[in-house]
Image (tube, rainbow, N blue to C red):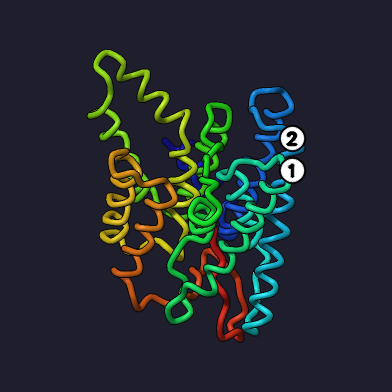
């Protein structure tokens, strides 16, 4: 017990050296790096070139959009914002292999970044930008998110990274409720005699851990109060899990974001102290999120 306590204290001290968004950024780089490694060894079907070129297009479109809109509105921009958004989109949108595909990725990234400036109320954006970009990709460009990050090869990395995120953010209860709803529904609908195998596939071969730890926990579009965060987790969990409702993961999250705004309409758009170290002389900092 004492050694476990010391290990926990040491881990917390290391996590305290990073902001929440910087931690997420580094972990996303790890996930993409792992995907490239498995692509080289043939464990992931997408080629290294397609993954890298798609990420480059997403980063360029995200940064350009962020720069253009922030300059037009005369507000400071945060470079982590476009990096996080583009990295998330690179893991949930299918890597492109032709010119049309790259245009769609660029459009999705541009819509994602624009949403945090345009779809706002009192300088507070309502929707998770990456989820909104993925939704727009399907709605406008008819290229729906594949969430290809949900593979057995990448899931162990996502589980370890997700634990670090939850430890940093203290969001174990919220994510635990979401996963409980997901797994409970999987048990109810599992085919008799194959429950354990289906549960294994539901956990290891789907993007549920990535969704829960990277997307669901985004600070500015999820509730901070425990009771509201649990309501949020239950709603998103149900919409995510019940296939008959026909909600994609990004649509389930956007519905949860709308609920968050409805429950906390007056919440400030200023980021949590644990997520940033901005100077107080700035009157407005545009939201930085995934």
Query: Is residue 98 shown above or below 114?
Result: above
Image position, residue 41 (x, y; %): 72, 23
Which of the 4 quarters of the picture holds residue 62?
bottom right
In front: 23, or 52? 52
Q: Which mark is residue 238?
A: none
Packing grade of label 2 (10 A; few <14, some 14-19, many >=20) is some
Image label count: 2
In front: 49, or 272? 49
Packing grade of label 1 (10 A; few <14, some 14-19, many >=20) is some
Q: Residue at x 45, y 64 (%)?
A: 127
Q: Which mark is residue 48?
A: 2
Query: Is residue 119 shown above or below 16?
Result: below
Q: At numbered mark 2, what does the secondary structure look like: helix, strand or loop? A: helix
Image position, residue 175 (x, y; %): 37, 47
Quadrant where the image shows the C terminus = bottom right
Q: At numbered mark 1, what does the secondary structure look like: helix, strand or loop? A: helix
Image position, residue 288 (x, y; %): 56, 66
In front: 20, or 259? 259
Alpha carbons under labels 2 and 1: distance apart = 6 Å
Residue 177 showing in the rendered view: no
Image position, residue 275 (x, y; %): 54, 64
- Reading the image, the residue beneath label 1 is 52
Name the side, left or right, on which 264 lies relative to 218. left
Residue 213 showing in the rendered view: yes
Q: Mark 2–mark 1 contact, CB under 8 Å?
A: yes
Q: Residue at x 43, y 68 (%)?
A: 126
Query: Is residue 49 shown above or below 252?
Result: above
Q: Residue at x 55, y 42 (%)?
A: 161
Quadrant where the image shows the N terminus = top left
Name the side, left or right, on which 63 lies relative to 133. right
Q: Residue at x 65, y 69 (%)?
A: 66
């Amino acid at each position: 017990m004492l050694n476990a306590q010391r290990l926990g204290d040491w881990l917390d001290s290391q996590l305290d050296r990073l902001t929440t968004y910087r931690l997420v950024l580094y972990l996303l780089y790890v996930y993409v790096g792992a995907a490239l490694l498995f692509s080289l060894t043939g464990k992931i079907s997408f080629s290294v070139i397609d993954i890298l070129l798609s990420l480059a297009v997403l980063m360029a479109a995200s940064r350009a959009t962020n720069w253009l809109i922030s300059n037009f509105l005369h507000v400071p921009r945060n470079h982590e914002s476009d990096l996080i958004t583009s990295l998330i989109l690179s893991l949930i949108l299918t890597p492109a292999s032709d010119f049309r595909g790259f245009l769609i990725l660029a459009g999705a990234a541009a819509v994602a970044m624009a949403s945090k400036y345009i779809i706002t109320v009192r300088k507070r954006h309502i929707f998770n930008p990456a989820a909104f970009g993925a939704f727009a990709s399907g709605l406008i460009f008819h290229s729906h998110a594949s969430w290809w990050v949900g593979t057995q090869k990448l899931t162990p990395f996502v589980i370890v990274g997700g634990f670090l995120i939850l430890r940093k953010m203290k969001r174990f209860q919220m994510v635990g409720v979401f996963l409980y709803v997901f797994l409970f529904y999987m048990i109810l609908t599992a085919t008799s005699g194959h429950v354990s195998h289906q549960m294994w596939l539901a956990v290891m071969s789907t993007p549920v851990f990535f969704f829960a730890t990277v997307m669901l926990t985004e600070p500015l579009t999820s509730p901070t109060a425990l009771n509201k965060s649990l309501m949020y987790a239950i709603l998103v969990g149900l919409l995510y899990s019940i296939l008959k409702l026909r909600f994609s993961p990004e649509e389930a999250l956007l519905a949860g974001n709308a609920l968050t705004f409805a429950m906390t309409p007056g919440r400030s758009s200023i980021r949590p102290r644990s997520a940033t170290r901005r100077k107080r002389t700035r009157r407005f900092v545009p939201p930085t999120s995934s």
